[in-house]
Amino acid sequence: MFATPLRQPASRQVQSSPASQFYEITDKGYGKDAVKLMHVSRKGAVHSIQECEVGTHLKLYTNKDFLQGDNIDIVATDSQKNTVYLLAKKYGFESPEKFALILAKHFLNKYSHVEEAHVHIEAYPWKRIREEYGDSYLLHNHAFLFTPTATHFCDVIVKRHDPKQTVISGIKGLRVLKTTQSSFVNFVDDEYRTLADQHDRIFSTVVECNWEYSDIENLNFINAWESVKDIVLKNFAGDPKVGIPSPSVQHTLYLTEKQVLDTLPQVAVISMCLPNKHYFNFDTKPFQQLVPGDNDEVFIPTDKPHGTIYAKLSRKDLKSHL
Ligand SMILES: O=c1[nH]c(=O)c2[nH]c(=O)[nH]c2[nH]1
């Protein structure tokens, strides 16, 4: 019988390799993503909830974790996950942005070898259930309805040697459609074009936008997010009776961004991306015997390919805002 050689503990097997003469790490980081958290706040009989998924990412000053396999500075992603729950218990969860700021600052304050912390939060769309109550309605004390109309997300980045705290809020998954008051005419007419001028078309998109704050002092992040969502919907839909004309996705996008900057002085810059979810008219001309006349009722929803329109609108005096 041969004695089995004893395996060295993994910690002793680490081969230290010097920093490469030829390569350098130009970006790095690590963290935990999609930490699912539910926070219930109870004020007597009235309960409030915030369910979300949290991502925490850290950048360390040194690269010895990557280069040498030296883990001494690594705050384990498992510990980062625990921190999410512990800080939610300790400080509560007022809004995604406030909680992200608490978490990001905690990582910098607690660990002097952390250079930068980035926290990403996506909130779940729970809304308090409303009950009809005579001519009015009552909001339920402790029951909620999952209302997935749009996702509220945020990104907070804090750096040790930069006093600026980056707070970006955003909306995604806000799908809207209107059946008129949208046109697209007078675009380049050359040998590549087949699309006819569209004087009255269906307009549908899935709004994705994010905006960066230059001033978060006393800001109510939830109210600000609702204001941006209302501006997006108003610029898309317009007056409930008559609507609002859109000559292109580009122009509607610009007017929306402009109104956000006009309305919210704390917002320094806003980016929007609007896919153009096409609905093509089904051509019934070859079927006149079956369905005589024009067709303005039956469309072919077309997911792919889709147009993509995006722009970022910044205040010209951005430097003084950021
Ligand atoms: O609003 C639009 N903008 C475009 O750039 C475009 N291109 C296209 O084919 N349809 C549309 N619609």
Image (cartoon, rainbow, N blue to C red):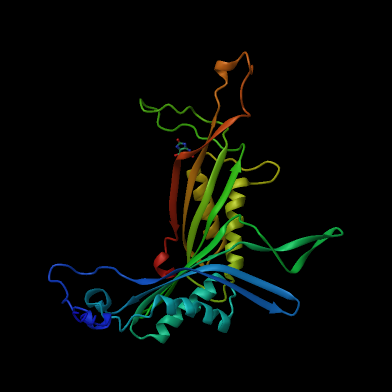
Residue located at (55% from left, 71% from top):
37
- Total labels: the figure holds 0
Q: In which quarter of the image is the N terminus?
A: bottom left
Vertical position of residue 171 compared to residue 222: above or below: above
Vertical position of residue 127 compared to residue 237: above or below: below
Vertical position of residue 164 compared to residue 261: above or below: below
Residue 52 visible in this rendered orientation of the protein: yes
- Left or right: where does residue 157 sit relative to residue 9? right
Observer-nearest of 15 and 80: 15
Residue located at (71% from left, 42% from top):
241
> What is the x, y in percent for residue 263?
57, 61
Vertical position of residue 143 compared to residue 301: above or below: below
- Left or right: where does residue 41 sit relative to residue 119? right
Q: In which quarter of the image is the C terminus?
A: bottom left
> What is the x, y in percent for residue 56?
43, 72
- Left or right: where does residue 218 sit relative to residue 61? right
Instruction: Farthest residue to the top: give it.
Output: 289
Observer-nearest of 229 and 47: 47
Residue located at (57% from left, 59% from top):
228
Residue 167 visible in this rendered orientation of the protein: no
> What is the x, y in percent for residue 148?
61, 56
> What is the x, y in percent for residue 59?
34, 75
Instruction: Farthest residue to the front: give it.
Output: 1
Instruction: Farthest residue to the left: give it.
Output: 21
